[in-house]
Image (cartoon, helix red, strand yellow):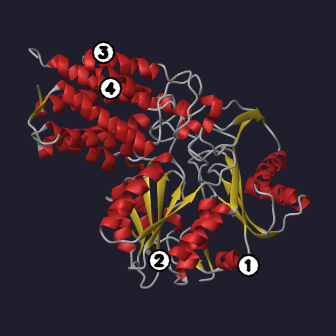
Amino acid sequence: MLDADFFRRWLTATAASVNREAERLTALDSAIGDADHGSNMQRGFTAVLAALEEEAPDTPGAVLTLAGRRLISTVGGASGPLYGTLLRRAGKALGETPEVSEKQLAEALRAGVDGVMALGGAAPGDKTMIDALVPAVDALADGFAAARAAAEGGAVATTPLQARKGRASYLGERSIGHQDPGATSSALLIAGLAEAAAGSSGE
Amino acid sequence: MRMLINVPETVVADALRGIAAAHPDLTVDVENRVIIRRDAPVAGQVALVSGGGSGHEPLHGGFVGPGMLSAACPGEVFTSPVPDQMARAAAAVDSGAGVLFVVKNYTGDVLNFDMAAELAEDEGIQVAKVLVNDDVAVTDSLYTAGRRGTGATLFVEKIAGAAAAEGQPLERVEAVGRQVNENSRSFGVALSAVTTPAKGTPTFDLPSGELELGIGIHGEPGRERRAMMTSGEIADFAVHAILEDMPPRNPVLVLVNGMGATPLLELYGFNAEVQRVLGDRGVTVARTLVGNYVTSLDMAGASVTLCQVDEELLRLWDAPVKTPALRWGM
């Protein structure tokens, strides 16, 4: 079972990898966007960690809901509302129980991804964060490591696609040949899940 | 790249402190990132609230004042503001007559303004929205995020702001804003890439001797790269792209807008070429504005925006306005 501490470790691991990869995210974004995805995600996850420390939410649902709210109020751009909705929806789906199963987490993430698709209007193949998140959620039944591999594979697979949503879509065919920055940061989020799981031995 | 800044993290806050010091007619909340006209809320008037990423100055903060915006919400550089900013601005400027959000059509701006509208409506504020999408370089189809909002934002904010200042009701001010957007088209070119403070190096590589056609205002590359053209050739290309999309019926307002690093000497020369092409095509020019209004940090280049106006829209354009960047008649 996964408790609030697991979810805190998940977001802490994600914040660390966002910090580590910020320059790469910004570089990917400068090729087909506006060169700020790394710094925006960094600002958001730094604020998330501060909020978790300050408010110390004690259920998995409360951790994700707080993180989502904080991303919406600090990131801006499309990433803020989209990542915020992902975590907030997932948090609401988890309710107020102190521990959740991996299956419940998978279902909650599915609800979060559905929320992102409804808000942003993107479908798989549009070269967005959805292309990493959907395969990851599909693979969660086989464990966190499988989800991580699926997300990373999904992010890499955006390279040959032509963007149909977001700022990259303005480039038309010139968006082909570049990996999508949003799918790349989504893979970091899923990788954080695997890191949190690996960190809790005995599970 | 040398920049006149302290550190990249504080460029927006530093600029807001400077705006506050330069413009006593404005109330600037540096911490919450809201610029408000000092006399707001104005009784009986619809309030206009806009906002967007920083880096496009004087848009939007420079257009706050009587006859134009009631408040502006600057985000991080090239990043839309967050919902809390617009909700706070709406609460500060609403007189009870309602608030019109002027939103440039970018995914981030649309999402954050929609969330802000929900927050404001929860507080009992009546909110309407005008989406600006005037850039003909983007094909409006299922395969893109739709046309970008660029130079027409100035026309929408000025003309809808004039309608609000006359005491017209919210649905009327909204209708005027929509009409201005529907009557406007823009096309932009870049002669250099843009350097954001956070990145410190140009966002794309544009070799000397080439230019980008059909660029936006965020340093994103355009649709097409060509060998460098003369001012006259660029004017031909830009105006034809606009007129192909919007065959002229009425007289037009012309905005020849600098992207930030192109001298006024060049902009005026470019305006002469734009006027030549319009004359050749039989388009009557009602008014012309030349200058840096909707910029993209340090990008060199220019955009052309045309807005077809009837007598009523022209009257509202000529109405008095008093903002840091646009001021006449008062």
Where residue A51 appears, as percent x and y from the top left, is: 19, 44
Q: Which residue is mark 2?
A: B46
Q: Amino acid at mark 4?
A: Val
Residue contact at pointers 3 and 2, CB within 8 angstroms: no
Q: Nearer the viewer, mark 4 or mark 2?
A: 4
Give how far across and how far down residue B197 sits, in percent. Answer: 47, 41
Same chain for the residues under marks 3 and 2 in the image? no
Instruction: Provide the residue designation for mark 1.
Output: B311
Q: Mark 3 belongs to which amino acid?
A: Ala
The label number, if any, that marks residue A137 in the structure image: 4
Tell me which numbered mark, 2 or 1, is placed earlier along the sequence: 2
Residue B30 seen in the figure: no
* Marks 2 and 1 close (CB-CB < 8 Å): no
In the picture of the structure, the residue carrying the numbered disc 3 is A146
In the rendered structure, the answer to whether residue A72 lies left or right of residue B128 reads: left
Nearest to the eye among marks 1 and 4: give it. Answer: 4
Number of dots carrying numbers:
4
Q: CA distance from mark 4 to mark 2?
A: 46 Å
Within 10 Å of the Cα at label 1, are there few (<14), some (14-19), or many (20+) other Cα atoms?
Answer: few
Mark 2 residue crowding within 10 angstroms, few (<14) / some (14–19) / many (20+): many
Residue A146 image-quadrant placement: top left
> In the rendered image, which quarter contains the N terminus of chain A?
top left
Label 4 marks which chain's residue? Answer: A
Three-letter code, disc 2: Val
